[in-house]
């Protein structure tokens, strides 16, 4: 069949075959736009061709996370602002005084490196490896599901071609997700005030930082002097960083629980297939919106809900400790109570970018039980002191559990008994179990006594003289 006799559908299929084989010689952007039937601007089509050609020639497996970094840094650096010498000096003073006050409020030691003021771009570069680690399971699920969905939408005579391009499709799907993750993290960099703002350890171990560009936005409507606000936020940031530096196991514990939740995510294939069937490359907003809104992630399974509950309790336990330590350390600040309430409210609600991150990976990193956890830590501090409280972070087995948040009195009773060298008081279940064991033991002893006199000396299982009841 001559080329002129082919219909547009056949011509477009031939185009896909040439693209997937890497043969882009002689392809004209304007001609491609006509063949696609979508009337895409030739300049835009040329850009798409360049991207496709790069993807087709790519030999590495997996997701190109550099796309996320470029997108995030593009957003973070849009205003072009850095940290002024005055801002750096003010925050250095705030961090110095905060460190002194924390020395009175906790026995957990100082950081190995001085805290610093950082730009939004520096925050992105420092934290992106953690975001990548957390998002990787979801990105893989979406990329694999996109491969399957596009394969089902392809004509029958192209199935072999689509199947052979599975790695490419996963790369394209993963690249879409990586770009969108970068978009969300870039937006997040315009909201966070400190390294520990989102509750999880995204900063490198031992690092603490405040973003002056966002500091002004946070305090704009609070009508609180900047020096008090800076001192409170510096204290909270240092407390968070010190805790993760002291409890080295805690960082891995948090990250593992987040990834445990993420590994359970399964993409809504019906929604993805519907999106693939009407996907228009000239209007990528629908796919971008579906990724960011969470429309491709179905309702949580029971296992995921349980994993999320465990994670929320863990984050609440961490944030509750930070809350109590910061409150004690900043007790001299006249506006400390107002600032603390503003921080709690901000953490409970979350900003637009944090909400977008929750939709993208199906996880909202907010400690819903922070007030209850803070009340538990306050009760522990009052009962056993600062040193006894902070010792609970020395080993994973000592850390309070969700049950301890529900029943702080039981935790306090165990800790005070241990501090006096006494056995920890048992709970009602332990008492009931001990009573049941005692009753069973007594019953068994009574049966042995009743059977012993009836046994003959010649029996094979007769009790030896030295073991018979007297």
Image (cartoon, grey):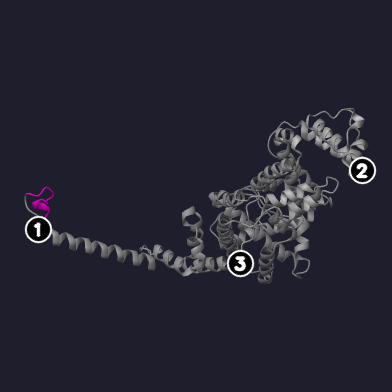
Q: Check contact, mark 2 vs mark 3: CB within 8 A.
A: no
| Along the viewing direction, whichever of 108 and 272 lies nearer the viewer | 272
* Left or right of 286, for residue 335: left
Indicate which label's residue lies in the foreground, 2 or 3. 2
| Alpha carbons under labels 2 and 3: distance apart | 59 Å
Q: Which of marks 3 and 1 is nearer the N terminus?
A: 3
Closest to the camera, between mark 3 and mark 1, is 1
- Residue beneath label 1, please? 454
Which of the two residues, 323 or 11, is positioned nearer the viewer here? Answer: 11
For residue 353, which quarter of the picture? bottom right
Characterize the local packing of mark 2: few (<14), some (14-19) or many (20 or more) Cα atoms within 10 angstroms: few
Q: Residue at x 68, y 71 (%)?
A: 338
Residue 392, percent across and down? Answer: 49, 58
Specify the quadrant that holds the C terminus.
bottom left
Residue beneath disc 3: 327
Query: Magenta segment range?
Result: 458-470
Mark 2 lies on residue: 41
Q: Is 3 placed above or below 402 here?
A: above
Left/right placement of residue 31 relative to residue 433 reads right
On whether residue 286 falls in the magenta region, the answer is: no
């Amino acid at each position: 069949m001559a080329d002129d006799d082919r219909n547009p559908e056949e011509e477009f299929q031939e185009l896909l075959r040439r693209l997937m084989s890497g043969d882009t010689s002689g392809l004209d952007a304007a001609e491609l736009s006509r063949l696609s039937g979508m009337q895409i601007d030739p300049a835009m089509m040329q850009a798409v061709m360049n991207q496709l050609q790069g993807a087709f020639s790519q030999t590495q497996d997996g997701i190109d996370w550099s796309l996320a970094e470029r997108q995030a840094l593009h957003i973070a650096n849009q205003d072009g602002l850095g940290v002024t010498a005055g801002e750096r000096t003010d925050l250095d003073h705030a961090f110095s005084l905060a460190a002194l006050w924390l020395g009175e409020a906790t026995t957990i030691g100082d950081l190995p490196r001085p805290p610093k003021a950082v730009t939004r771009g520096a925050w992105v570069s420092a934290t992106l490896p953690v975001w990548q680690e957390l998002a990787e399971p979801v990105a893989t699920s979406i990329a694999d599901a996109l491969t399957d969905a596009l394969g089902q939408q392809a004509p029958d005579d192209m199935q072999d071609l689509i199947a052979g391009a599975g790695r490419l499709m996963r790369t394209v799907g993963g690249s879409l997700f990586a770009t969108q993750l970068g978009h969300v993290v870039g937006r997040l960099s315009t909201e966070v005030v400190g390294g520990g703002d989102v509750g999880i350890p995204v900063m490198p171990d031992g690092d603490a930082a405040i973003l002056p560009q966002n500091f002004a936005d946070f305090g704009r409507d609070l009508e609180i002097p900047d020096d008090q606000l800076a001192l409170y936020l510096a204290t909270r940031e240092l407390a968070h960083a010190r805790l993760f530096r002291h409890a080295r196991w805690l960082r891995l514990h948090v990250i593992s629980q987040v990834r445990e939740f993420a590994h359970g995510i399964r993409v809504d294939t019906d929604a993805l297939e519907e999106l693939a069937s009407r996907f228009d490359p000239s209007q990528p907003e629908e796919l971008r919106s579906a990724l960011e809104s969470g429309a491709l992630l179905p309702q949580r399974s029971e296992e995921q809900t349980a994993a999320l509950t465990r994670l929320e309790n863990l984050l609440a336990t961490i944030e509750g400790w930070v809350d109590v330590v910061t409150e004690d350390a900043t007790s001299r600040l006249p506006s400390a109570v107002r600032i603390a309430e503003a921080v709690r409210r901000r953490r409970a609600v979350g900003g637009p970018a944090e909400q977008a991150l929750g939709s993208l990976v199906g996880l909202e990193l907010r400690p819903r039980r922070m007030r209850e956890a803070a009340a538990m830590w306050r009760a522990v501090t009052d009962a056993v002191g600062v040193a006894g409280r902070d010792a609970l972070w020395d080993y994973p087995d000592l850390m309070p559990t969700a049950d301890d948040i529900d029943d702080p009195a039981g935790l306090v009773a165990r800790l005070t008994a241990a501090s006096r060298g006494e056995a920890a008081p048992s709970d009602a279940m332990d008492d009931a179990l001990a009573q049941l064991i005692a009753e069973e033991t007594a019953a068994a002893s009574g049966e042995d006594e009743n059977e012993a006199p009836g046994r003959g000396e010649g029996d094979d299982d007769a009790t030896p003289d030295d073991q018979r009841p007297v």
